[in-house]
Amino acid sequence: MYDALIVGGGAAGMSCALVLGSAKQKAFAQGKSIGIIAHQKSSHLQTALFNNVLGLTPGTTGASILESGKQQLSDLYPHVEQIEKEKVLEVLKTESDFEVRTNKNIYTSKIVVVAVGYTNLMRIKGLKQFVEPHPRAAIEKDRIWLKNTDHLIEENLYVAGTLAGWRSQFAIASGSGAQVATDILTLWNGGKHTKVHDKII
C-alpha cells in the first residue's frame, strides 16, 4: 500500500517524486510510502534538446535528464521506490483507495498522480471518462487532457504535466508536477499550505 503512487517518469512525474521525497524530515510526511512507476519510453523528453530552460546548460538533452533524474531521486531520496520496466494498464478506484495494474503487477495506493504524455495513445483503463481534447494544443495534433480542476480529477486522483492541460514546455511540465506534490503535502499536513525549500545557511 502506497500513500502516493506516481504514474510516469517524465518531467512532471519525476518533479513530483523529487518534491514529495524532499519532505521526508517533515513530521506529517514521515513514514509515508511513495512510489513512482518510472516508465519513460514514450516521454517526449527522449528527443528533446534544451537551450531555453533556466538552470540547464544549453545543449542539454531530454534523454540525459531522464537518466540523471532517476539517479538524483535515488541518491537524495532513496525511500521513494522507483518501479522500472512496467507499463500501467489500468487505474481502478476502489471503496477506500486505488488499484494500479501494470503489465506485471498490481499496486494499491491512497493517492495516484497520473503524469504520462498527452497523446491520444494514452490507453489507461479507468481514466477514459475524463479524456477530452487538449485545451492548449493545436487541434490537428489530436492531443488530449484529463479534465481536472487545479490538477485534481477527483478525490485523491491527480494529473500533472501536459496531460493536465498545460503546454508542452519542460519548465511548465516540471512546475506542474511540483505543484501537485505540494498539494499532496498540504493534504498530508492537515490542509496547511506546504512547500519544501532547501537553504544555504
Image: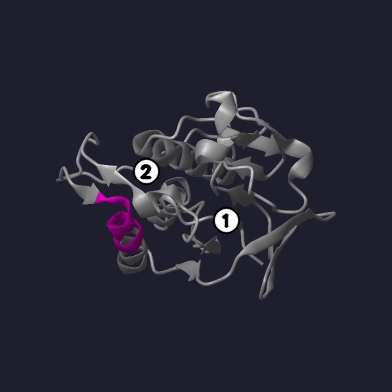
- Disc 2 is placed on an element classified as loop
Q: Position of residue 95 (x, y in %)?
A: 85, 54
- The disc placed on residue 124 is none
SS state under label 1: strand
Residue pictured at 64% horizontal, 43% vertical: 120
Q: Dominant secondary structure of the magenta stretch? A: helix
Q: Is residue 96 magenta?
A: no
| Residue located 56% across and 55% down the image | 6
Residue at the far front: name it: 140
The kind of residue tagged 1 is: Val
- The percent position of residue 123, horizontal first and vertical second, equals 69, 52
Evaluate if marks 1 and 2 touch, with contact meaning CB atoms under 8 Å apart.
Answer: no
**Would you say residue 97 is visible in this rendering?**
no
Amino acid bearing label 2: Val
Neighbourhood count class around disc 2 (C-alpha, 10 Å): few under 14, some 14–19, many 20 upward? some
Q: Residue at x 72, y 40 (%)?
A: 155
Residue stretch in magenta = 61-68
Residue 61 rendering spot, x and y as whole percentages: 26, 51
Q: CA distance from mark 1 to mark 2?
A: 22 Å
Of 22 and 158, nearer the camera is 158
The coloring applied to the image is: one colour
Location of mark 2 (residue): 196
Q: Is residue 100 visible?
A: yes
* Residue where numbered disc 1 is placed: 7
Closer-to-camera residue (139/46):
139
**Direction from residue 152 to residue 174 in the image, left or right:** left
Inspect the magenta stretch and tell me whether residue 63 lies in it.
Answer: yes
Left or right, 162 with respect to 130, comes to left
Query: How far across and down, in percent of the image, does residue 97 sit?
Result: 75, 55
